[in-house]
Amino acid sequence: MGIMDRFRRKPAETRASGTGYTAAIMAARESWLSGSSGLAELTATVQACVSLWEGSFAMGAVTGTDILDRRTLALAARGLALRGEALFLIKAGRLVPVSGWDVSTFDGLPRAYRLSIPDAGGGRSATALAGEVLHFRIGSDPAAPWSGRSPLSRASLSAGMLHEVETALRDVFRDAPVGSQIIPLPEGSAEDMAALRHAFKGARGRSLVIEGVAQATAGGMNPNLGQRPEGLTPDLARAQVGEVLRAAREAVALAYGVLPGLLNGAATGPVVREAQRHLAAWTLQPIANLVAEEASAKLGATVAIDAILPLQAHDAGGRARALLAVIEAYGRARELGLSPEEMAAATAMVNFAGGGDGA
């Protein structure tokens, strides 16, 4: 190399950007490995609860804005159920879902965001002020009110138990010699015993172990006495795996606001309706109110989301009886000559004036 070659400019080295395809795949892989809670996110129980949240939000009745469509509500519900928070960028009259973000706060309130927006050919980065995004979150801790926590992370013990039990059952049915037996047979030559061992096949093609009777009875006078096939299938009933698995599933369902009776195979119609009302009134409607409050603050309009009436999660018979009682009360008020102001004051005393979506 000559002395002038040392001063020549080297060609620019091209590197993959942090938001390219490789970075997106690595981020997706890391999210799949760790998850939002780290445990039990791929179990059927959790996915059933998440599906209930998704379906309920997708059926929710939104008033005050057209930007919160059903697809966006379903994405928000899944993010809230698995991550505890969901974030959307407000852009040109629509909401763009965000896969990852960093937040800057002041007095515990978000001030600015650095966003990672997913795309099919690789994501991109963007920055936005707090007023330009919708940040939904639940289960916030006072130490970090700008972030949310999923029900799984708040019930890590139950989720961990469910994860461990299902993993143990998977390992048992994958590795244990289910269906295999030890069959005692009279002693023979080594070739005959080898042929017998290869003739018998257990579960998943494994050879059955054939025990020599002479070795089993220490060469006694009655080698066939008391000999019977011995199964190698693990006794899971003594470990009470079914009870532990059922308790873990019920605990995870309760963490999502789903009554355990809904998971019972013998559940009847009244139980299903009561579980539906409980989920909608005590879990989904408060979360819908939080979403509506965030949307009202950022979109400049009064937004309301009803997660009870569209699901028919109310007592139709009780409402019919209440309506009949109200009509009779109004008729009795007319007979007594009460003024409209007096009737309004009376209904306000029993909270009929305020009402409520879940009343």
Image: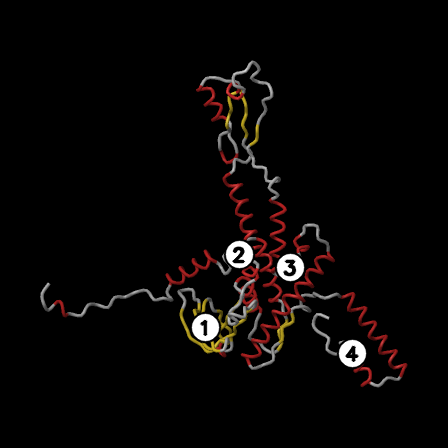
Say whether disc 4 or disc 3 marks the residue closer to the N-terminus: 3
Q: Quadrant of residue 59?
A: bottom right
Q: Position of residue 162 (x, y in %)?
A: 57, 51
Pinpoint residue 118: horizontal percent, then vertical percent.
44, 67
At label 3, counting other C-alpha atoms closer than 10 Å, the crowd grade (few under 14, some 14-19, many 20 or more) is many
User: Distance between the Cα atoms at labels 1 and 2?
Assistant: 25 Å
The residue positioned 78% from the left and 65% from the top of the image is 317
User: Which labelled disc corresponds to residue 349?
Assistant: 4
Horizontal side of residue 355 vs 198, given as left or right? right
Q: Earlier in the sequence, mark 1 or mark 2?
A: 2
**Amino acid type shown at disc 2:** Glu
Q: Amino acid at mark 3?
A: Val
Earlier in the chain: of badge 1 and badge 4, it is 1
> Mark 3 or 1 closer to N-term?
1
Residue 111 in picture, x, y percent from top left: 47, 78
Q: Quadrant of the N terminus?
A: bottom left
The CA span between labels 3 and 1 is 32 Å
**Tag 4: residue type?**
Met
Residue, disc 1: 103
In the depicted structure, whether residue 259 falls above or below residue 321: above
Label 2 and label 3: CA atoms lie apart by: 16 Å
Q: Disc 1 to disc 4, how far (Cα)?
A: 46 Å
Q: Secondary structure at mark 3?
A: loop
Q: Which mark is residue 258?
A: 3
State the SS at label 1: strand
**Pointers 3 and 1 in contact (C-beta within 8 Å):** no
Residue 41's tag is: 2
